[in-house]
Image: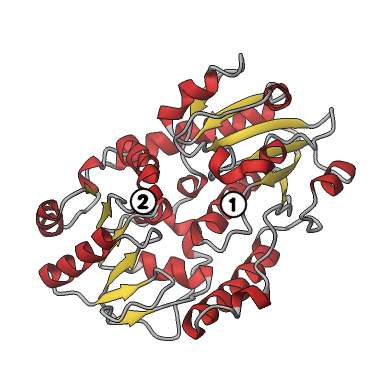
Amino acid sequence: MVSSNKIGILTLHRALNYGAVWQCYALKHACEAMGHTVETIDYNPYGHYTINGVLRHKPLVAYSYLMHMWHFNRFVDQYLNPTPHTESHEWIKANPPQDNIYIVGSDTVWSNAVAGNYLDSYLLDFAPSHVKRIAYAASTGGNPMELNDYQLGELNKFSAISIRERQSVSDVQKLTNIPVTDVCDPSLLLTKEEYEKEEKKPLWLPKHYIVYFDLAGDPFCADAVKQLSKQLKLPILNLAGKYMRWARYNYLAPTPEEWLYIIHHADFICTNSFHGVAFSIVFRRPFICCAAKKGGRSKTNGRVLNLLNQTHLQDRYVTETSQISKNAMGGGKIVDNEMFIASYKERSLEWLKNAIEQ
């Protein structure tokens, strides 16, 4: 019989981002299903959004931010079992969570561009010597990790390392003798039935709609959803967080549970978001993933391409409007890919189980 461990998860759960909180929920849920006690390490060195900062925006944007802050803070408290909150690296080093295993991941916790000056923390340098360190689906953002000598030393204190993007495995492996492998994002570890228990229908929702979920502010994704709307004869439901006058419906700040329901019951999804793609796969919804073309966001395409390659859904990725008609008319249904999705999930769960128990 496997003994129960007390596990602390460190990730980017305080981002005002639906994928960020649901992937943390999923990893916590998966570890609990293995018989362990789990908490989320509520360390956020980036700091909270402040009311004064939010109110500097235009009214609709300020409303969206305020509602997101309310919904996401409530979600963390209700679902993620947070430790005492801190934004101080010095404080958490002096007061480390009382767990015997720390897991860092998923999301871009090992990206120099995202973690920046806080990368030491996401290498778990505050962990006491007796605490086992595991990286589950940590992402470098698709770029090689740049570590100083201190950070290299912290990386090599891990007992197990897995990376979300397969193309980053070799880059991380060059930095350590610890075997590095790729695993799926935590959001894919749970079944749609497990998510259904938590989703909540909004007070009002149209019967049929196409979801527009764009985190990049990319004109190509907007053009794509407009074209799809005409071809499929579906009204556009905007989940991008900013008001779009051309969308029939604008849901600026649904709760995380409502967001899940909206994705689950969409007729079609048009997105360039990694987790927009991930939850389209979880719920087996027809979708296309638009290549991000605007500015630095184009560097994030590797994340979704890795996910689509692993699940053999490469044909869902579009880079030109000429590809959209073919994908729309085909329905984008996930039919012949179940074995690849299941295999990806099972080997990832097996890796996580072994990393915790070894």
Q: Is residue 43 left or right of residue 328?
A: right
* The image quarter in which residue 206 lies: bottom left
Task: Residue 204: give x, y in percent of width and height.
Answer: 40, 85
Mark linked to residue 235: none
Q: Give whichever of 223, 101 is nearer the camera.
A: 223
Badge 1 density bin: few <14, some 14–19, many ≥20, Cα 10 Å: many
Task: Residue 235: give x, y in percent of width and height.
Answer: 22, 77
* The image quarter in which residue 175 lies: top right
Q: Are marks 2 and 1 in contact (CB under 8 Å)?
A: no
Which residue is under mark 1?
Answer: 24
Numbered disc total:
2
Kind of residue at badge 1: Cys
Q: Is residue 128 left or right of residue 319?
A: right
Which image quarter holds the C terminus? Answer: top right
- Give SS at disc 1: helix
Which image quarter holds the N terminus? Answer: top right
Q: Give whichever of 273, 9 is nearer the camera.
A: 273
Please report the residue visible at 88 percent of the width from the left and 46 percent of the height from the top.
Answer: 95
Please report the residue visible at 45 percent of the width from the left and 80 percent of the height from the top.
Answer: 202
Kind of residue at badge 2: Gly
- Give SS at disc 2: helix
Q: Is residue 213 left or right of residue 43?
A: left
Which residue is under mark 2?
Answer: 295
